[in-house]
């Protein structure tokens, strides 16, 4: 029995809130999120880098064989041929040229090494041999390195074709003002070189997580960066060291790491950016026993991250691609039967053992679409399992699929 004036007043008061929320939380970006970011020092970027990494990963797999990763035997049989195909066809999904901690060339060589790396990336882009996404990590905006970092970006971007989309990773962020100050620099770089720049913030300092007033600095940084921001990347070792964690216990599955990454996920939820897991520095090199131990560790960390909703991490060595894809493919293939059945029941409005809501259906569709994106799943098997076209699943998931 309420009058229209009550409804009108409610709309009047909440309309600004609605608009502000939509502006701050536009939802997930369309398309594909890479399953990893491969960091390669600027002086180690070689022509055909992605294919080189893929060949090295296949050679390691041929030499040592895939160890028991705790998979169901039938699942393991499905995974290995797909991993081999991925390593031969698209071994690197996202490349980051590293001119920061991974670079050891020294200040006297950095200009030349960065120019040379950019020329290689430009040539690979022109040849269609570059990864789907590329970027660069320069030095931080701390006083001692900020001019060097911006100069490196200027040199690198100046060698790339106009219109190239590049991700810029800003490391060791300590204050939201650094993010705000960096945005006009990115504007100037875009204007000068005609590139399209996305921004990642590397979370590797306690100050980036918790501000002096006790608020979560991550959220302030994410919203200050705005639509340029594509991700918050966890820096395993710098962050752990800054907390005083002993070197032997610095790892991406440490409880302190989980706290930071949990807050990262909350800070970017709904903004269009994503939270990204860090790396392990235990590399699969040496004897077969050593390689298998490193692969089991890496596969376990990848699987753990996927279970926690972190769909992307760092890889630092070609042989890590073996277990990046083995663990990722096993995760998505194992998820398909249950996700397909629940999606079919949801879309058919059939009562079952689980009563799913629209948000859960979006998550179920999202898992299937991610499996398609990275090559863990194929369109025919997904459509057969769900009895729906991929386009229908994409509509439920709220985004277009990254692959057809």
Image: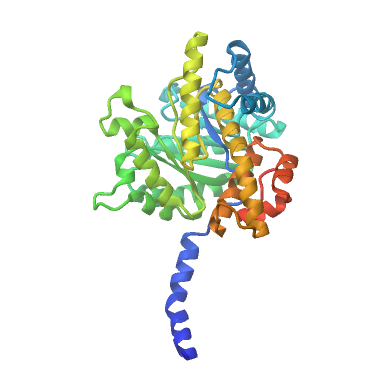
Q: Nearer the viewer, residue 82 or 150?
A: 82
Question: Can residue 31 be seen in this snapshot?
Answer: no
* Quarter of the rendering containing residue 35: top right
Where 330 sits versus 209, above or below?
above
* Quarter of the rendering containing residue 129: top right
Q: Nearer the viewer, residue 107 or 231?
A: 231
Query: Residue 55: x percent and y percent?
Result: 64, 19
Q: Residue at x 51, y 26 (%)?
A: 299
> Quarter holding the C terminus?
top right
Q: Residue at x 66, y 24 (%)?
A: 77
Where 174 sits versus 108, above or below?
below
* Quarter of the rendering containing residue 162: top right
Residue that sits furthest to the top in the current view: 287
Colour setup of the view: rainbow
Where 105 sits versus 372, above or below?
above
Q: Nearer the viewer, residue 362 or 187?
A: 362
Query: Residue 161: x percent and y percent?
Result: 64, 39
The number of numbered badges drawn on the structure is 0
Query: Residue 318: x percent and y percent?
Result: 56, 22
Query: As drawn, is 143 to the left or to the right of 381?
Result: left
Q: Residue at x 43, y 36 (%)?
A: 149
Query: As drawn, is 66 to the left or to the right of 201?
Result: right
């Amino acid at each position: 029995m309420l009058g229209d004036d009550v409804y009108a007043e409610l709309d009047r008061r909440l309309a600004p809130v609605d608009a502000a929320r939509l502006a701050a939380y536009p939802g997930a970006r369309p398309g594909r999120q890479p399953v990893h970011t491969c960091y390669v020092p600027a002086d180690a970027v070689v022509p055909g880098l992605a294919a080189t990494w893929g060949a090295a990963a296949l050679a390691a797999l041929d030499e040592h064989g895939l160890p028991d990763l705790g998979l169901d035997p039938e699942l393991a049989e499905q995974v290995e041929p797909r991993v081999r195909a991925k390593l031969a066809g698209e071994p690197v999904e996202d490349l980051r040229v590293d001119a920061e901690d991974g670079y050891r060339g020294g200040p006297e060589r950095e200009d030349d090494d960065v120019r040379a790396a950019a020329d290689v990336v430009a040539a690979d882009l022109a040849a269609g041999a570059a990864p789907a996404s590329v970027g660069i990590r320069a030095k931080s905006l701390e006083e001692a390195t900020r001019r060097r970092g911006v100069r490196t970006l200027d040199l690198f971007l100046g060698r790339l074709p106009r219109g190239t989309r590049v991700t810029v990773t800003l490391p060791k962020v300590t204050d939201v003002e650094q993010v705000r100050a960096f945005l006009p620099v990115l504007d100037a770089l875009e204007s000068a070189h005609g590139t399209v720049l996305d921004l990642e913030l590397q979370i590797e300092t306690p100050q980036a997580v918790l501000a002096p007033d006790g608020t979560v600095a991550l959220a302030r940084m994410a919203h200050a960066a705005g639509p340029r921001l594509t991700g918050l990347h966890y820096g395993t070792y710098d962050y752990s060291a800054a907390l005083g964690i002993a070197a032997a216990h610095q790892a991406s599955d440490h409880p302190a790491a989980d706290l930071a990454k949990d807050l990262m996920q909350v800070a970017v939820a709904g903004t269009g950016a994503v939270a990204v897991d860090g790396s392990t520095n235990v590399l699969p090199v040496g004897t077969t026993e050593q390689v298998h131990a490193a692969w089991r560790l890496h596969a376990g960390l990848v699987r753990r991250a996927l279970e926690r909703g972190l769909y992307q991490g760092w890889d630092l060595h070609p042989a890590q691609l073996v277990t990046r894809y083995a663990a990722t493919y096993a995760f998505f293939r194992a998820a398909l039967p249950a996700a397909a059945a629940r999606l079919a029941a949801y879309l058919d409005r059939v009562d079952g053992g689980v009563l799913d809501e629209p948000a859960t259906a979006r998550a179920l569709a999202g898992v299937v679409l991610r499996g398609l994106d990275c090559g863990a799943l194929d369109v025919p098997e997904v459509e057969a399992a769900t009895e729906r076209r991929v386009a229908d699943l994409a509509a439920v998931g709220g985004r277009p699929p990254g692959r057809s």
